[in-house]
Image: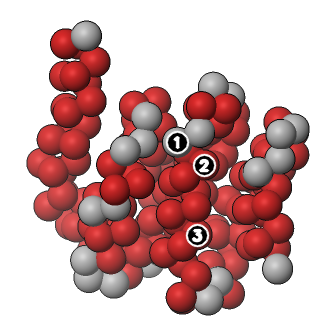
Amino acid sequence: SAWEVSVELMRSPQLNVRFFGANTLHQKIKGDYEELPAEARDNLLAAIFGFMQLPEVCSQPQILTKITLGAVALSLHFTKEDGKFEKAVLGSSTFLSLPLPAALEFMLLLPQEFESTSFTTKRKDEAMAKFSAMLPHVVSLLQQPLSSSTDD
């Protein structure tokens, strides 16, 4: 399937192939999320977070941005279920161990991707309420790597 091919393309040593894979994944998540089997969604997000940890991805801003947009888009779909976003993102050891550039990229792209979703106004309001409740936790998570990087 295109889902699996996109993930495989992200493993390529060629930057243009990686970018194509990240872009395809982002577009599939935005447009065809419902086609992704429910049991594969958590694994896909974990795989994307895994790519975001790779130095060769973090050192390529265009690829990091594209793959992060995929992670953000998939994460936003998780807001449909109570506690799913919190567990899959903020409770994920893979997400919590992202390098600082990747974690910041995720947080910076979240509002942009949120605004471009096709969610109904009611759904956006519900998601915004969840995000607002999580804000202190997110700030705490971001302060940890920031404070340790200034201690060095």
Disc 1 is placed on an element classified as loop
Q: Residues within 10 Å of mark 1 (few under 14, many from 20)?
A: many
Secondary element type, mark 3: helix
The disc label shown at residue 147, or none: none
Look at mark 2 in the image and give the residue it sits on. Answer: 51
Residue at horizontal 58%, vertical 69%?
44
Q: Residue at x 44, y 67 (%)?
A: 76
Res 14 → quadrant: top right
From the viewer's side, name the closer residue of 15 and 127.
Answer: 15
Residue 53 disc label: 1
Report the quarter where the N terminus lies. bottom right
Q: Amino acid at mark 1?
A: Gln
Cα distance between the residues tagged 2 and 1: 5 Å
Quadrant of image for the C terminus: top left
The correct choice, above or below, for 88 with respect to 122 in the image is above
Q: Secondary structure at mark 2?
A: helix
Whether residue 123 sits left or right of residue 6 in the image: it is left
- x%, y% of residue 15? 83, 36
In the image: residue 113, left or right of residue 147: right
**Amino acid identity at mark 3:** Leu
Contact between labelled residues 1 and 2, with CB atoms less than 8 Å apart: yes
Q: Position of residue 23 (x, y in %)?
A: 75, 53
Residue holding disc 3: 44
